[in-house]
Amino acid sequence: MARYTGPMTKKSRRLGVDLKGNDKNFEKRPYPPGQHGRGRIKESEYLLQLREKQKARYYYGVLEKQFRRYYEEATRKDGLTGVNLLVLLELRLDNVLYRAGWGRTRAESRQLASHKHVMVNNRATNIPSYRVKPGDVIEIRSRARESQAVLGSLEVFGSRDVPGWLQTDASDFKVTVVDVPVRTQIDAPVQEQMIVELYSK
């Protein structure tokens, strides 16, 4: 269950987008890190494509090898490869928990899943990359609802706009996957076509 554990603000500044969400340090210094951070960089086509791929990777918390597998799976599906890739990433359990407002960041939502605080269709799971499908019901386990760590993660529950492909029930701590997301419902700051162009070389 490998993941990136380095400084996310540094990655946000390098890629020019807030990868964590509400990152105050990124807001204060929205330019690349390092002593040459404010200098001009020659932005080649390859650099722009690589930057989009890195944005998607760090935004969803996926390592390179796993991201490549998602891309290969997306190429085998009907439709646009870039959109298929984003849909596969959106359907990860940790992302669904984040979208539902069960964590301030995807890292918090990932921790909820990996510590077995979550059930999918009445079965406990500790796999953050578990792929949900329409009709799945996700809920916080009853014994975990009293935990201070879980209550801290749930502080934002109900305060975030939930996308239309999810339906939340705040009273029962449940989320139902209503449908597969479409591109207009995915607000990832990524130009997916550039990722396809990068991998197509």
Image (spheres, rainbow, N blue to C red):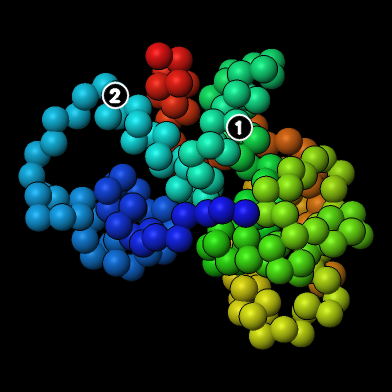
Point 54% across, 25% down: residue: 82
Residue 185 appears in the rendering: no
Residue 200 in percent (x, y) is at 45, 15
Does the residue at mark 2 contact the one at mark 1 (Cβ under 8 Å)?
A: no
Most foreground residue, 143 or 139: 143
Q: Secondary structure at mark 2?
A: helix
Q: Earlier in the sequence, mark 2 or mark 1?
A: 2
Residue furthest out toward the right = 122
Q: Amino acid at mark 2?
A: Tyr
Most foreground residue, 184 or 42: 42
The residue tagged 2 is 46
Image height check: is 171 above or below 59? below
Q: Quadrant of residue 102?
A: bottom right
Residue 156 in percent (x, y) is at 60, 71
Residue 95 in percent (x, y) is at 63, 51
Answer left or right for 52 relative to 106. Answer: left
Task: Tell me the distance, in whole angstroms, between the alpha carbons under discs 2 and 1.
Answer: 21 Å
Q: Amino acid at mark 1?
A: Tyr
Residue 23: image tag: none
Q: Quadrant of the N terminus?
A: bottom right
Residue 15 in percent (x, y) is at 31, 45
Point 74% across, 43% down: residue: 131
Point 73% across, 47% down: residue: 130
| Local crowd size for mark 1, using a 10 Å CA cut-off: few (<14), some (14–19), many (≥20) | some
Image height check: is 106 above or below 178? below
Count of all numbered marks drawn on residues in the image = 2
